[in-house]
Image (tube, coloured by chain):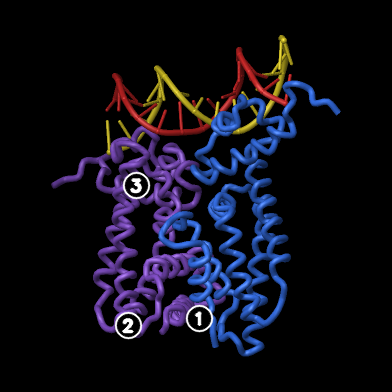
Chain colours: A blue, B purple, C yellow, D red
Amino acid sequence: MARKSGSHADITGPKVREAALKLFARDGYAAVSMRKIAAEVGVQAGALYLYTPDKQSLLYDLMKVHMEELLDAWGQADTGGTPPERLEAFARFHIHYHLDRPDNIFIAYMELRNLDDANFAEIEVLRRRYEQGLIDILEAGNASGDFAVPDPKLAAMAAISMLNGVTTWFRDGGRLSRETVETIYWDMLRKSVAA
Amino acid sequence: MARKSGSHADITGPKVREAALKLFARDGYAAVSMRKIAAEVGVQAGALYLYTPDKQSLLYDLMKVHMEELLDAWGQADTGGTPPERLEAFARFHIHYHLDRPDNIFIAYMELRNLDDANFAEIEVLRRRYEQGLIDILEAGNASGDFAVPDPKLAAMAAISMLNGVTTWFRDGGRLSRETVETIYWDMLRKSVAA
DNA sequence: GTCTATATTCTGATAGAC
DNA sequence: GTCTATCAGAATATAGAC
């Protein structure tokens, strides 16, 4: 199949989403205009509407793909074992995955309020599913006597908040390596829920 | 001194900042127009410029006042003692203070990117001063043998991230009381840095 | 001190040429 | 598939009446 000259649907589509992700993460959804996204891609504003029905769908699609990929990746990384082993896997997975995708987590946690009601509800389901995975581990650890967590729901929120924070300050090439950071965070989390 | 009828500078000024705080926290700086702030206050858009030179200054003033009050309040709450005592005071203070001012912390942590460069630099100094207070406690605890914190800077970030998270889900009248939440968070933090 | 009116720029989105 | 041109409305901010 010969590619028609001037036809770039297979390239421009992904580039639009990449540009939107980058700019939404950097400046915030509301502060980014369709013209700025177009300029980042290197097309005119009108051309964007070949790839998305509107700006809101662009945000929703980015979030949905991110959450689905996150859930899928954690499903693969969660290879079982004792509750402490699973918790370590979760902590290391979460930090590692998010440090590789700082823009994604930024919009996933900061731009929820810019989703319209129906889209928000759908993303919220996926977000809660991810949280529930951690809650399950904490409850299993309580049952096995490895953990002493008075409220697994609260502890899960606290743990995720703590781990998420790493993306706000970590930079590759800084004072600490990823491996060191991962280990220190895991150590704090381990002690915080220990029996 | 008789008040002139129709003159409300002493009332409207604070109302403008209150309205801006509320709307910036709810919808985000970029999504809030001067017209919406004016509508919330009950005046016309043009009248706002009697109380602020522009929208950016409104955001900056809110952040600056918040950070200065936060630093001042922690200065009062930090009554000394052993490192574990001071850490407990910090944890309880931080949660308590922020649950009372959810809008303030929301903009302080979410709208930093909407400050222009000069304003950002000034707010960042205040933010780091607050963080440094916690780092000092952790270092004192390492020295006294109460804590075993391999990297106090990182641990301070992790702790603040964890504590900040409470504002994203806590609602008065929910499943858990403030006192319970405060105690559970403090317990997790205590264990996470323990020797 | 607040209003109305306005200047100017930008917004999301669409229509039609190529 | 991308462009130019354009619409209708909203944005920040200012000027001048009252």
Write down the residue under mark 3.
Answer: B120
Disc 2 packing (10 Å; few <14; some 14–19; many ≥20): few
Q: Residue at x 41, y 60 (%)?
A: A175
**Label 2 and label 1 in one chain:** no
Q: Would you say residue A107 is visible in this rendering?
A: yes
Q: Residue at x 45, y 45 (%)?
A: B29
Q: Which mark is residue A191?
A: 1
Q: In this view, which residue lies farthest toward the bottom?
A: A145
* Left or right: where A132 falls relative to B18: right
Write down the residue under mark 2.
Answer: B85
- Which chain hosts label 3? B
Q: Amino acid at mark 2?
A: Glu
**Label 3 and label 1 in one chain:** no
Is label 3 in a helix, a strand or a loop? helix
Q: Nearer the viewer, residue A144 or A34?
A: A144
Disc 3 packing (10 Å; few <14; some 14–19; many ≥20): some
Q: Which of the marked residues, 2 or 3, is nearer the chain's N terminus?
A: 2
Residue A146 position, x and y percent, is 60, 87
Residue B123 position, x and y percent, is 32, 51
* Left or right: where B192 falls relative to A68: left
Residue B44: quadrant of the picture: top left
Is label 2 in a helix, a strand or a loop? helix
Q: Nearer the viewer, residue B18 or B24?
A: B24
- Which chain hosts label 1? A
Residue contact between numbered discs 3 and 1, judged by CB atoms under 8 Å:
no
Residue B117: quadrant of the picture: top left
- Which chain hosts label 2? B
Distance between mark 3 and mark 1 Cα atoms: 35 Å
